[in-house]
Image (tube, grey):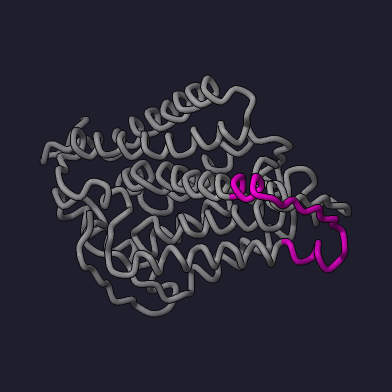
Amino acid sequence: MFTTSTGRLRPVWSFVISIVLSFAAYVITGVIAEAVAGQHYLLLEVISRPLVALLLIGVYVWLLTIADNLHDHRIAAQGLPLTLGWRQQFVTGCLLGSTLTVLAVMPIAVSGSGTLSFHHGIHTLLRAGAVLFVLLAGALAEELMFRGYPFQRLEEGIGALGAIAVFSVLFGGVHLLNPSASVWGLTNTVLIGILLAIAYLRTRALWLPWGIHFGWNATLGLVCGLPVSGIRTFNVLVWTSTTGPKWMTGGSYGIEASATGTVAVLIGLLVIWKMPIARSAGYVQLAADGPLAAAGDAAAGAFDQVGGEQRVEQDDGGR
């Protein structure tokens, strides 16, 4: 009931346990960060975001060892293999995320519905560096949780489409806790979750979705000075105040709750579906279960075929 014939914990049970431990990791790091930082919100983020990413990696390494009988390449197995082209995937993701953000913000700029104020000085540059670090670590933590080990185990249990549906709704639901959250913001966040999940499935690695996630948040919060899912903590260089219809600006939540944000994400979905991407090989599924590895290859291959051309896999090892 609980284990396979090879002694592995069944994927659905691994999923359930990993989700419980993941949320516990977020709660624990939040308590620690608040105890240290108090009301200093940027310091709180600097402490909590990298800490939760490290804790999640540790939890998933433990689960891969105990539940999945995997003793090698356990970080690579989470979706972070150092395969050929991993840097290119991350940079491509950053560029795509930034481009989609610009497309979403452009109607506000063209209509003149925003006013900008700029901040400068050494202290501001230091804060900007801290924000970049926070956004990089925060995007990694969310990708590890929503497209990493828990997603991978659920996909083994119920298939790619079911896993995409469950985790995209979870991704959107978590963001309902953010300030000024709305139904439109929830819908767009679910769509973003689908985009990031397909980016993972197309590459079988987290580099591309991590880059998209980071590029979107960094451009939106640090460069454009707009709320990131309702949060203003990251507007340290530029602060943009928007006026105009809520369908265009997203109100206090930002463009992630706007129609322009919806259009940008839909464009992103089309790009990810069609763009030629080299798929990371070697750590698609756990080597202990050959049939599962073949199933993982088949699922990713299906995404490649629908997108157009079959891609050639390349691999020069991993962690």
Name the quarter where the N terminus is drawn. Answer: top left
Q: Is residue 71 left or right of residue 98?
A: left
Vertical position of residue 143 compared to residue 275: above or below: above
Vertical position of residue 258 compared to residue 151: above or below: below
Please tell me which residue lies in front, 287 or 2. 287
Residue at point 49% right, 50% down? Answer: 136
Query: Which quadrant of the view contains residue 6?
Result: top left
Query: Which quadrant of the view contains residue 293?
Result: bottom left
Residue extending farthest to the bottom is 309
Magenta includes 12? no
Please tell me which residue lies in front, 14 or 251. 251
Residue extending farthest to the front is 122
Q: Is residue 244 left or right of residue 16?
A: right
Could you tell me residue 56's position as x and y percent?
Answer: 37, 37
Q: Is residue 33 left or right of residue 222?
A: left
Please tell me which residue lies in front, 280 or 236. 236
Count of numbered tags? 0
Could you tell me residue 256's position as x and y percent?
Answer: 68, 51
Residue extending farthest to the left is 6
Residue at point 49% right, 68% down? Answer: 272
Vertical position of residue 124 compared to residue 204: above or below: above
Residue extending farthest to the top is 35
Q: Is residue 83 visible?
A: yes
Could you tell me residue 231's position as x and y percent?
Answer: 67, 40
Magenta includes 106? yes
Q: Which residues are magenta?
A: 105-128
Residue at point 30% right, 33% down? Answer: 13
Could you tell me residue 305's position as x and y percent?
Answer: 38, 74
Q: Is residue 1 left or right of residue 133?
A: left
Residue at point 20% right, 50% down? Answer: 73
Q: Is residue 187 visible?
A: no
